[in-house]
Image (cartoon, grey):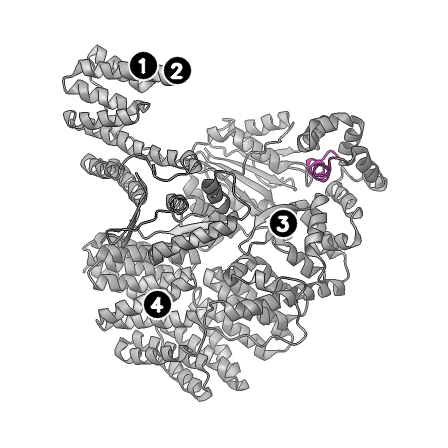
Amino acid sequence: MTAAIRFRVLGDLEVRRDGALVVISAAKLRIILASLVLRAGRVVPVSVLTDRLWDHEPPAEARAALQTYVARLRRLLGADAAIHSRNGGYVIELPARSCDLQELDELLEGTRLAQDRGDRAAALESLRAATALWRGPILFDVDSAALHRDEVPQVQERCLEAAERRFALELALGHHQAVVEELRALTTAYPFQEGLRAHLMRALYRSGRQTEALQVYRDAAAVLRTDLGLDPGPELRAAHQAILLGETVDDEARAGASPSAPALCQLPPAIGDFVGRADQVATVAGSLVAGGEPARLPIVVVSGVAGVGKSALAGHVAHRVRDRFPDGQLYVHLGGGGPAPRDVGEVLGELLYALGVLPAAQPRSVQARAATFRARVADRRVLIVLDDAADAGQVTPLLPGTAGSAVLITSRRSLDELPAADHHRLQPFSVAEGLALLGRIIDPARVAGERPAAEELVELCGRLPLAVRIIGARLQPRPTLHLRTLADRLRDEQRRLDELAVGDLAVRSELAVGYGGLAGPVQLALRRMGLLPAESFAAWTLGAVTGGSDGERAVEQLMTAGLLEPAGVDLTGQLRYRPHDLVALFARELAGGEDDEVTRAAYRCLLDTFLVLAHHVHLRVDRKDGLPPDPLPDGIAAGPVDIAGLTADPGAWLQTERAQLLYAITQACRLGSYDKAALLADLTIPSLSIRGGYDQIVRVRAAVRDAARAAGDERVASRQASSRADVLLSLDLDRAAAEFEESVAVFRRLGLSHELVHSLTGLAFARMFQGRPALPHAREATEIAYATGDPENIVLALRTHADTLVLQDRPAEALPLLDRALAHTQALWNTDSHRALLVRKLDCAISLGELDLADKTYAQAREVTDAVNNAHGLGWLLVHHSRLRRARGDLPAAMADAREALRRMVEAGDPRGVFIANLRLAEALLAGGDSPGAAALLRALMSTSDVASVPLLKDKAEALLSRAVPG
C-alpha cells in the first residue's frame, strides 16, 4: 500500500495526495519544501533556509517571513507530512516510502545486499528500479542558487552512481545492445561523466560496433580538453586501450562493487589557529601509528596543567593521522576537569550507538557494554580520542582489547597507572608560539606594533595557550585598547606571578586578573555563574541567580572580559552563553568560597523563578496522569524575566531547561528546601518524562523523597515515592510495585484519597505486567474515586479498571468503562489522558472486531497526539495501529507502523515500548508468512531486552515464538 502523500524530487518537484497533484506554485514555498524533503527527518537550520530563500541577503524580517511561509506550507501538506520547529530550524517527518529519494536509498541498499549474497538478478532489478526514479535534472524547477550549489549535486551524484552501477551490471550480464541508446542519451545529458562514456564504449564494442566505440572516446577526449582542459581519465583510457588491443574488458568487479559507507569520524573540527608544537605533534603522531609489537595496542596519554592546550594538540594530531585509521575515528569528552566526570556506562552507550548498536540492544551493565565495545572494534583500525579523562578508572573500560586501533587520551593527571601507555607531558608555549597565537586572534600587525608589551603579556599569562586566548578575547573586540595598558593591569598581580607556572594556579591567577577588573555586580555574576549546572545558559538565568539583576548586562560585560562566549539560540529564541571549561571551574571555586547562607539565598531566587515559570508552563503543557502539584505558595516571585515570552512554547522551554530544572531540584534538596524541590518536580517531571531519560528522573525523585523523609514530612515523601514508581513502571516492575505498596499503606493511614487512588492504579498496572491479580486494586480505586467525585481520579481509575479487564480478555466489559472515562475528560484539560483513553479504546475495538470503530478512534487519537507533538505518545498509538492494519490485511503498512513505533520508543528510552513494538513487528511478519524472520526477531528480543523477564511480556513473546516455530 502506498502512502497517501508522495514527494518526488528526482526531477521536477512534485507532491501528490492519493494520486492527485498538490499544487504548490509559490517559489519560496517550493524552495522550503525541497530543502526539507532532501533532509527529511533531519533539522534544517533557519540560517540555511534563509540563505536559500534570499541567496545570502535576507531581509530584516527574514525569520518572521520564514515562519509565515512554513505555516502556509503546513496548511497545504496537511497532517500527512508534519513540519516541526526544532533546535533552531525545521524538520519534516515523512511517512515511510513516501519520497522517491527514500526509495532510491532503499533500492541501493537492496542492491548491496543482493550483491553480497551473489544474487545478480536481484541486484539488477533493484538498480533498474532505482534509475527509473530519476526523471531528469534534480529540482530544475526550484529557483534557488544556494540549493543547487549546496545540496543538489550530492543527490545528482547518487543518481549517477545508481546509473553507472546498473550499466556495469547490464554489461556483465551480456545486455550490450539493449543499453546502447539509453547510454547515448545519458552521455549527451552528462558529457563529463566518464564512467557512462566508458560503459557506452564497451556496449558498442561488444555489439560489434568497434568504430563507433572508438568515436565515443574521441568525442569524449575533445569535450574534456576543450571545456575542462583535461585529458581522459584512467577508466576511459583503459576501455580505449582494451578496444584497440581487442581485449575483453572484465566488468565483473565493477558490477559487483558497491561503495562502502564512509568511515565514521566524530573528531571536532580542526583548529584553524593551531600554532607551534611541531616536535610534540610529530612525537604523539609517531606513537599512535608506529608499528611496534604486533599485539600491542598504542595508548598515548597527553597530560598537563589546565589550559596548556592538551585538547587542541590531540585534535590536531587526530586529524593529521586520520588516513591511518580507515575504519573511523571516535571522540568523546569525559568531563574529567569538572565536579562530575561523565558516567562510563553512558559514554559506552554513546560509543556503541556510534558503532551501530541501538540503545534497546545495548546491555545495561558497564562490564557488558565494555565487552560489546571491545567486540565491535576488534580487528579494526579505529582511532579513539578520550578527551579530558578524570582518572585511569574512567578510561580503562573504554580501551579496545586487540591491536590495530589506537587510543589518544588527554588528562590533567598523568595517568601513570595505565599499563603500557606512552606518556607525554605538555609544557607551556615558548614566547614565540604565544605571540603567534595572540597574533592569530587580534591581528599580527597589532602584535608587531607593540612587540615588547605583547611579549610581556605572554609571559604574564604563564605562556599557557588558554590564558593567551583569554587575553586575546579581551583585546580583540577593543581595537583601541593598548596592549601596554592591559600589561600594566596584569603587572599589579605581581604577588601571584610566581604561581603562574605551578599546576592549576597558573590559570586561576590569570582568571583572577580578569575577575579583579570587573565591577561589583559583574563579579557577583561570575560567582553566581558557578552555581549553574548547564554547559550553556540564557541571560535571564544568570539574572535570577544574582537576585534579579540585569542578566543581559552582566553577560555582555563577562563577554567583554573574555570569560563568556555565545553558544547559539535555544528553542525559546533566547541567546545562550557558555564559559570555557576552566572559566566555569574558576567560577565554581569562587561560589564555593561564599557563605552557605549567601549561596542558599541565591538558589532561592533561582528556584522561585523556576517555580513561577514552571507553574505557567504546567497550566498549558500536555502532561501525563500523575499526582497534581500542590498550589504555588504565597510569596513566590520570579525575577525580572519575560514569563510570557519564555513560556510561549511550553514544550520548548521544558526541553531547553531540562538540565537546569533537574539540577535545581536536587540542589534545593541539599540546601534544605525539599518542599520547593517537590513542587518543582511535580510541576515539570510529568512532562519531562514524556521525552524519556527515565534513569535520571528516578534519581531526582528519590533525592526529593529522601529529603522529605529526613525532614519528617511523610506526605511529601510518599507522594514522591509514588511519582517515582510511575517512572519505574518502564524500568523495573518489582521496584515500582514495592514503592506503590508502601505508598498505598501510607495514604490509607493518612486518609489521602486522591493520592490513594493514584497509588492503587499504579499498583494495579504493575501487577498486570507481573502476571499477578490486579483487578481488586483497580476496583477499589474506582470506588474511592467515585466517592471523592474528583473527575481526574475517576478517569484514572476507570482507565486502569478497563486495562485489567482487557488483560483478562474481556474487552466488551472494558469498552463502556473507557467511554465513561472519555465523557469525564470533557471537563478536564489533559490531552495526554484523553489520548491514552482513545488508544485503549482502539485496542478494545480491534479485539472485538469492530474495525470501523477502530478506524474512527484511531483518527481521533491521532489528531489529539499530533496537536501536542507527543512523539512518545505517537509511538504507542502506532503500536496499536499496526495491529489494526494487520486486522485489515495490510501487512506492509502494519510492518511500517511497527518499525516507526519502534524507532520512537528507542528515542524515548522506553524499554517496555521497545519490546511491545517488536512484538507487533513479529506478529506482522508471522501474518505475512515470514516465520523464520519472526522467530529470529523474537529470539534476539528475548535474549537482549531488559524487560524480557516481565511475566506478561515474556508470556506474549513465548506464545508468538511457539507459533513461529511449531513443535
Q: Which residue is mark 2?
A: 229
Q: Which residue is mark 4?
A: 861
Q: Residues within 10 Å of mark 2 (few under 14, many from 20)?
A: few
Question: In this image, 438 relative to 800: left or right?
Answer: right
Inter-mark Cα distance, 2 to 4: 63 Å
Q: Is residue 628 magenta?
A: no
Q: Are marks 1 and 4 in contact (CB under 8 Å)?
A: no
**From where the camera sits, is residue 944 visible?**
no
Q: Which residue is mark 3?
A: 577
**From where the camera sits, is residue 160 visible?**
yes
Give the quarter of the image for residue 613.
bottom right
Please state which of residues 245 and 136 is positioned toward the viewer in this rendering.
136
Q: Secondary structure at mark 4?
A: helix
Q: Which residue is mark 1?
A: 222
Residue 883 drawn above or below residue 160: below
Residue 861 locus on image (x, y percent): 35, 67
Lower sequence index among marks 3 and 4: 3
Residue 418 drawn above or below residue 535: above
**Mark in the foreground, 1 or 3:** 1
Inter-mark Cα distance, 2 to 1: 9 Å
Lower sequence index among marks 1 and 4: 1
Q: Secondary structure at mark 2?
A: loop
Q: Is residue 474 magenta?
A: yes
In the image, the segment drawn in magenta is 462-479
